[in-house]
Amino acid sequence: MSDQKTERLINLTMALLATTRYLSKGEIFQNVAGYSGSVETMERMFERDKENLREIGLRIDVAPLDLLFDDEVGYRIKSENYALALGELTPTERSYASLAATLWRNRILHDSGHSALLKLSALGGSGFGDDFGSGLITLENDTPHLDSLWNAIENRTLIHFSYANPEITERTFAPYGLSLWHGVWYVVGFDTNRQDIRVFRLSRITSSIEIEPKKNAYVIPDDFHIKDHLVMLQEPQRVDCLALIRVDRCHALRALGTVTSIDAEWDQVQFQYQEEKIHELLWFADDLILQSPESLRESLSSLIHLKIEVAARKSIDQGNTPRSGGDDE
Amino acid sequence: MMSESALDRVARALDLIPFLASNPGLSIVEIAEQFSTTPMQISKDLSLLHMCGLPGYSHLELLDIDYQDPHYVSVTDPQVLDKPRALTHIETLALVMGLTMLEGLTNDQQERDNIATFRKRLSFMLEESEINISPAMGLAMLSTEQAVSESPYALILAQAIAAGSATEIEYISATSDTKTHRVIYPQRLFFQGGVGYCEAFSDDGQSSRTFRLDRMISINARDRVSPDRVSPDHDNPDQSSDHHPLSESGTSEISPTLKTLKTLKTSPTHEVQIVIPKEGFSFLENHSEVITSAHFDGINYDLVLQVQSGEWLLRTLIALPYPAAIIGPAEFAVTFSTRLERTAENYKNREN
């Protein structure tokens, strides 16, 4: 774009913003710097300019110039639609905004957060970064594929990719939404092969994302809410557990529960734990003895004996795996 | 630098004026940094904006910008561009989702409430904006709940970094299963694999360590200001860092899984060969940085690991939900078996 056109677009924005009434095309062509040539030429320029300004998010209102005759319309940008109307920010809010805007490592939200912060900075007042510094925290892992998926969702385009779990399968997918959970991005959508909603972990996508050219190829259901499909966000069921723990050991577990002293060697801890993660207690090895629930005690005991057997044999047979893995597709 | 899109320049120009009006006295270099472009581009933008204004285009109607001194740019008359443009839908989303995450980084209820109030103000804009009716990407399509593991002290540490002050922590070591009290000088805060870390100098000022946020069980901010210290040395292999995975599930209740970090100092000292079943696929994802070779025969993974802490590896393998075997070195395999047998002994006596 030439300087001339850039200049004209800025002048047009300012003119439409400054007016308190709708401006006719004639008034615009006559008064806004940059319009020249035949009427047809200027008409074409103006149509492209309007489109360009709308592309950068400006809302141009259009209304009949004469209430009785709607054959000629006028144009303006209302200040309430143009300007950031967030009111005054407190220094604390500015600090929160600064931190929130700089958390992102992925390109889309990083760039958007940065430009948001520039706009908030233009509201005046100091304090950005005063409380927390700036750019202190980043929350994500590297995020390949996120741009492609984001664009596919925005355009409602079908995508194709290879997915490892651990066997590699080819997927055709209508992406509906994205979730960042424990530092890793997931995509939720409709798997056209499985004919059902599926959740995929982006880091397990082994190919590039192939995006079909047709836009609006699917409709995201009105009642779609991503959280309804993220099982990891559901409150896990926990069971009451009782365990003996060696004195001055198992500190992480002590922090979770209530500890009572038994004797010089052992304490007892009462705590709640997810049943399906009970194997994690083996991390404390012989510093912990799970007492109840009895069923989980037996599960742990069986698992240890299986581990002893495999460790001695130094090989794993099919059937030596008590549970299946995989937390998503 | 990649060539910018044509309209990016118009958008930047419209944002530049209110920004300069509110932030007078910046140099062209500083402005370029803020707008992620080159000083030459900012100079061109200013030259162009200098010619823009309202119809009439006399000196009274033009934008009045002073940029003759490249070290001091100011806008004397922004005309109608005195206010920043409204946030776009995606800009608002970036802030709202970021604030949602910040709420999880503090256990101070007042602070959580303040963040939530601010987030709701922004969310309201998102919902009310007429431009954003039927957005292509809405809040219902995005989730950042539990974006990271629980880290209730992150904001306190961030404040300590900004203030250069000390912090007293009670900390559980992942490897040695011990609890210590320490005074640290936080230097850097970051998350990897959903787990938060704080890089800090110890109280003696002689060494730096990286602490896992989820292993801090209490914290007290101190007023003491950090003395001038050398920068943390990431390459010093003698410096220990606490980055020892506890389980592979990623959502351990005791402590979440984390990857061994390239950003942290690591000094692999043991090469260990192990076998895990195919159900251990996520083990490969979560510990990829310590895995130097992996072979999958359709049933099992044969892995070679380079680990800094043998104790970490033993505990991690014991806590897996499936069996694993250590192929070598032999002393590791023996220790592993011994540890398992001692643990099994605990469950032989049913009166425990």
Image (cartoon, coloured by chain):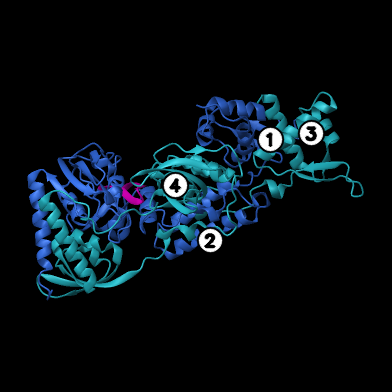
Could you tell me the amino acid type at mark 2? Thr
Q: Residues within 10 Å of mark 4 (few under 14, many from 20)?
A: many
Residue B220 or A196: which is nearer the viewer? A196
How many C-alpha atoms fall within 10 Å of the one at disc 2: few (<14), some, or many (≥20)? some
Q: Residue at x 27, y 50 (%)?
A: B280
Is B170 on the left or on the right of A233, as rendered? left
Work out how far the residue at label 1 is from the one at label 2, CA to CA, in angstroms.
Answer: 35 Å
Q: Secondary structure at mark 1?
A: helix
Residue B183 vs B13, above or below: the answer is below
Q: Pick out the residue farthest to the right.
A: A68
Instruction: Please state which of residues A104 and A213 is positioned toward the viewer in this rendering.
Output: A213
In the visual, does B208 lie left or right of B348?
A: right
Which of discs 2 and 4 lies nearer the camera? The answer is 4
Q: Position of residue A88 (x, y in %)?
A: 60, 54
**Residue on which disc 2 sits:** B117
A45 to the left or right of A189? right
Residue placed under numbered mark 1 in the picture: A52
Lower position in the chain sequence, tag 3 or tag 2? 3
Tag 2 near tag 4, CB within 8 Å: no
The answer to whether residue A14 is magenta is: no
Share a chain, discs 1 and 4? yes
**Badge 1: residue crowd in 10 Å (few <14, some 14–19, many ≥20):** some
Q: On screen, A6 above or below B90?
A: above
Q: Amino acid at mark 3?
A: Pro
The residue at 10%/47% (across/down) is B332
Please give the residue where the numbered disc 4 appears in the rendered image.
Answer: A103
Badge 3: few (under 14), some or many (20 or more) residues near its Cα, within 10 Å?
some
Q: Which residues are magenta?
A: B186-201
Q: Position of residue B223 (x, y in %)?
A: 33, 55
Q: How many marks?
A: 4
